[in-house]
Structures are given as C-alpha cells and as structure tokens.
C-alpha cells in the first residue's frame, strides 16, 4: 500500500485482512494508476486545467453548470468542510439528497478533502440512517434541507458517542445558516489532498435485498477502474453524449452511470429528482439525452409511453440493478427500436463486470466478461463447472469486496474470488446466462426451478404489470412455486385470473415450473434502487 493521506485511519484500520480480500487484477494498461491519486483530478479538475472548463457538465431543471462551475462549487464546499466543519482526511461524511447538482458538488468536495463519501438513499428513514451512522462512525453530514427530518432524528438518537454525528450542514437552503451562505464566504480555490490510490474514498452501503445492508469500501483507484473497464469497451460513449437516468447517486449503479462515466470523458449528465415514467420520457426529449440508465422495472413501465423516443436523440439504453427479463428487452425494442445493453454489477465491485453491447446482445443472456475482469462458474465444491451447467458466479478484477467489519466477508470472498450470490451458466460462445440468485433457486419435487424464468413467462401476459416468484414450503414437494403478482389496471384479482395465468405459464415454459400458488398484491417490496426484495416476499409467505 502507498503512504496514506488519512489522518483519521478508521477505514484503513477496518479493512479486512489481506488473506480475506479477493485477488485484484490490473492487467489492462489503463489500470496502471499512479501511487498518488485523488479521483477528483481526472474526473473534474483535469478538464478545467486542460481548457475544457467551458463544456457543459451538469444540467437540471432551470440549471446548467459547466465543468468550471462544478469545480468552483466543489472547491467552495471543500473549504467549508475543512475550515468551518473541521473535516480531516479519512473522516466519513454522510451525503443525503435526491439526484441534483448540489449532491454532485458535495461528492466531489468530499473527494477533494480526502474524506470518505457515505451517500444514503433519499427514502431511508431514521432507523436505517442510524445504522449507517453507527456502522461508518459518521461525524459530519451534508444534507438537502428537504430531507432533514429523518437525519435529525437519526442524529439525535445515536447511542454510540464514537459515532456521534456532530456536524451537519444543510444545502438547497436559502437561510444564513445554509451551506450556500457558507460557500459564499470561502474561496473558489482548493488544493486537493494528495491521497493514495488505495485510500478509501467511498463507503457504499448495499441496498439490502437480503436483509441488513453491508458497507463496502472502495478506493480512489476503484472509482477510476470502474471508468476504464466497462464504459470504453461496452458502452463506448463520446464526449458529446448526454447521460440521464433514475438510479440514485447513492447507489453505485447511479454514481457510475450518472456522474463518474460522463465526467471521465468530458461528457455531460442530466440529474433528475423525479424519475416517474412520463417525467423521464419528457426529460429525454427536453434535454436531448443520448444515453439512459435505469432498471428493468422502469423500462417496462416506460415502454407503454415510449413511442416519442423512437427516432429521438436517445441511442443507448443500459439496464442493470436486477436481471433483465427477455420479455422486457423485447418490449423495449418494439417500443423504441433500441436494443438494450444489459449488465450485471454489484456494490461490492463498484459497477458492471459482465455485459454485452447492443450489437452483440443475446436475448436471455447477460453478456460476456468485461475487459479487466475474469469470471468462473463454480460448482458446489468450488471447482469450475462444465459449459452449460448452472453454478455460482465468481469474479476477479481490479475491484472487489471489502466489507467494513462484517463477518459476511468470508462468504463473499473465497479463494481470491468474489462470489456474487448469482446462479449462472456459461454457454459455448462465452455468454453468461442468469438463472437466479443462489438463494432463490426453487427445488420442487427434485426439479430446479429458477424464479426469474417463471417471472419472465408471467410478464409476457398482458394482464401482468409486475411479479415476484419465490419457493414456499410444501410437505409433498419440498417447495412449490408461488407467484406474487401486480395486475395491470382494469383486471380483477380473481381465482379465474389466477388459473388463466397458471395455464399461460404451463404453455410458455416447462409445465412443472408453473406457480402452484398465486397471490395478487397492490405493489411489490422493492429497494429504493428498484431491486425486488425476495426475502420480504418469503417473510410474508
């Protein structure tokens, strides 16, 4: 490890021991990062230094910032952090806001001062924020004033003096006590802290699809590695592209797709606080967006009103965050003419590591391994599975899992591999086919049934808006398939409808896979990033 710039050594002291960490690979020339690296420089400051400060960087309703504008805001906030709030390198700074320009400026300010950005989803309540504050030992926060209530409750109820949140500054606040007023009192110049490439700069909390969220630790080099692997080799954006999407910046899918990737190449991004289907379609047309990032659920919801996007400026659509059903891919292409770019990533590895571009997309397959990474399908004995066999997906690359003080490190990292918790199969052409989460495989009367396959069949029926499929205990079969379904408006949740859907699945896929139990609900439990929380479905079944 290079000499750390951190004065507060909490994150470095809390790293898993080397033998518990995955093997890291830096084979690509682009991954040879210098020992001293602050990711704010290549993502922001270098553009200004090399004469690109006048390029548009961030747009939002009634706002348009250039790279020079964003640098100025970030520098002023950095001065507030250091001179007013006493932040030292290594402190954890909680960030809390919808996707907006000030949130981006605050993130860069935290990078500049050598602190650790701990971003939180806007919908988190005080109980969940308390967990973040305690786990990360957060002492400082920058928060959108509109989200103040829950953070105030969490800060007041913190039981651990060592993780007491002492300093909060509110932004998008017009008062004399707001962050903007403090920024006005400070210089627009700031010299970035000379951080090491392996200084932690992000504590990213997992979205909690399997219960208690875990804190993942990422270095400055991890941030830049995510920018030089998947984007140039699969997405292939240009500096003239305009990025847009729905995932929160607190989610690494959103941080990469809506901030890191556009800025890494001098492109621009549009940050929207509202991502409802009609809002998103209107914004794509208004801002002439060219690249869209969102989850499969969102694509399916937008498809019905996506007609105006056909022939628009939109040219690339990226799906990640959960498995992309083939039915949703087909629906989107029919509506817009655009073939989706699918990908699987993980908070533990920062971003996407298996994907295929729109030219090489294979319906039903996630894609191939992204340059910089290697993958292997492992059997139950930890040995490579045969081609076509379903096994556990294991990954190595320039990024990898480092949980903060969490015993689950041992189950995620084994023999140098990151085990993502996904069941995949590899075909003879090198495409990886998703089957389920490894804890979602349903075993019924000796048959292995992948829940997402049943979901995909159900989603093809015109009456189904959303669905989740789980296995529930059964004395005779061990488990049976249960479908929890949200119907499209105008359809009645009757036994006749349930039988119609069951018969439809029998005709679509192997009959033994049909859902023997059907429950109709008004909405499915999802994380704020759109992922279906199957553990909650199982808890209530």
Image (spheres, rainbow, N blue to C red):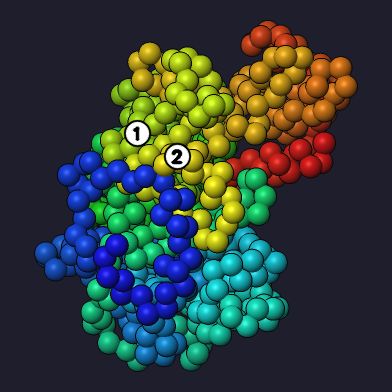
**Residue 21 shows in this picture:** yes
Name the residue at 35% across, 15% down: 429
Q: Percent x, y for residue 260?
A: 33, 55
Q: Secondary structure at mark 2?
A: loop
Q: Where, quadrant-wise, is the N terminus in this rendering? A: bottom left
Q: Are the residues tagged 1 and 2 within 8 Å (C-beta)? A: no
What secondary structure is found at the residue carrying circle 1?
strand
Asked if residue 433 shows in the view, the reply is no
Q: Is residue 390 above or below residue 168?
A: above
Q: Residue at (42%, 74%) from the top-left corner? A: 9
Residue on which disc 2 sits: 415
Compared across the picture, whether 263 is left or right of 402 comes to left
Nearest to the observer: residue 167 or residue 387: 387
Determine which residue is flagged by label 1.
Answer: 374
Residue 10 rendering spot, x and y as whole percentages: 46, 72
- Above or below 94: residue 467: above
Q: Position of residue 209 (x, y in %)?
A: 63, 45
Q: Counting other residues with Cα less than 10 Å from the Cα at mark 1, is it few (<14), some (14-19), or many (20 or more)?
A: some
Q: Nearer the viewer, residue 369 or 262?
A: 369
227 left or right of 17?
left
Could you classify mark 2 by the number of other residues whose Cα lies within 10 Å: few (under 14), some (14-19), or many (20 or more)?
few
């Amino acid at each position: 490890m290079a000499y750390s710039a951190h004065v507060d050594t909490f994150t470095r002291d809390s790293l898993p021991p080397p033998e518990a960490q995955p093997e890291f690979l830096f084979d690509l020339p682009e991954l040879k990062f210098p020992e001293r690296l602050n990711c704010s420089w290549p993502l922001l400051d270098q553009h200004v230094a090399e004469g690109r400060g006048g390029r548009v960087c961030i747009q939002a309703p009634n706002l348009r910032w250039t790279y020079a504008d964003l640098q100025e805001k970030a520098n002023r906030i950095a001065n507030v952090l250091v001179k007013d709030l006493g932040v030292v390198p290594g402190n954890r700074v909680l960030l809390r806001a919808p996707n907006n320009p000030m949130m981006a400026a605050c993130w860069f300010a935290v990078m500049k001062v050598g602190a650790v950005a701990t971003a939180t989803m806007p919908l988190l309540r005080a109980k969940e924020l308390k967990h973040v504050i305690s786990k990360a030992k957060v002492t400082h926060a920058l928060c959108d004033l509109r989200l103040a209530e829950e953070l105030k409750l969490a800060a007041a109820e913190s039981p651990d003096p060592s993780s007491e949140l002492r300093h909060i500054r509110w932004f998008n606040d017009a008062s004399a006590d707001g962050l903007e007023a403090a920024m006005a009192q400070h210089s627009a110049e700031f010299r970035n802290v000379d951080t090491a490439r392996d200084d932690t700069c992000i504590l990213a909390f997992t979205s909690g699809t399997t219960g208690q969220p875990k804190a993942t630790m990422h270095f400055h080099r991890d941030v830049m590695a995510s920018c030089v692997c998947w984007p140039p080799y699969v997405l292939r954006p240009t500096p003239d592209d305009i990025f847009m999407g729905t995932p929160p910046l607190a989610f690494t899918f959103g941080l990469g797709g809506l901030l890191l990737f556009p800025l890494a190449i001098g492109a621009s991004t549009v940050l929207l606080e509202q991502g409802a289907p009609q809002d998103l379609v209107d914004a794509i047309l208004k801002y002439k967006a060219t690249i869209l990032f969102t989850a499969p659920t969102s694509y399916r919801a937008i498809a019905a009103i996506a007609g105006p996007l056909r022939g628009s400026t939109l040219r690339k659509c990226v799906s990640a965050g959960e498995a992309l059903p083939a039915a949703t891919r087909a629906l989107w292409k029919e509506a817009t003419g655009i073939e989706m770019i699918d990908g699987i990533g993980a908070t533990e590895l920062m971003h996407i590591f298996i994907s295929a571009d729109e030219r090489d997309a294979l319906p039903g397959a996630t894609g191939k391994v992204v340059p910089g990474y290697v993958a292997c399908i492992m059997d139950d004995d930890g040995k490579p599975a045969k081609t076509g066999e379903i096994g556990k997906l294991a990954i190595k690359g320039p990024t990898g899992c480092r949980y903060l003080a969490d015993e689950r490190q041992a189950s995620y990292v084994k023999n140098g591999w990151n085990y993502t918790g996904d069941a995949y199969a590899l075909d003879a052409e090198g495409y990886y086919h998703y089957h389920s989460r490894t804890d979602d495989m349903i075993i019924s009367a000796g048959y292995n049934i992948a829940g997402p396959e049943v979901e995909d069949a159900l989603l093809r029926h015109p009456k189904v808006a959303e669905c989740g499929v789980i296995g529930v205990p059964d004395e005779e079969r061990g488990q049976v398939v249960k479908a929890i379904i949200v119907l499209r408006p105008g359809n009645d949740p009757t036994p006749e409808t349930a039988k119609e859907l069951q018969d439809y699945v029998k005709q679509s896929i192997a009959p033994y896979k049909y859902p023997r139990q059907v429950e109709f609900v008004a909405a499915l439990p999802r994380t704020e990033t759109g992922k279906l929380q199957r553990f909650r479905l199982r808890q209530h079944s």
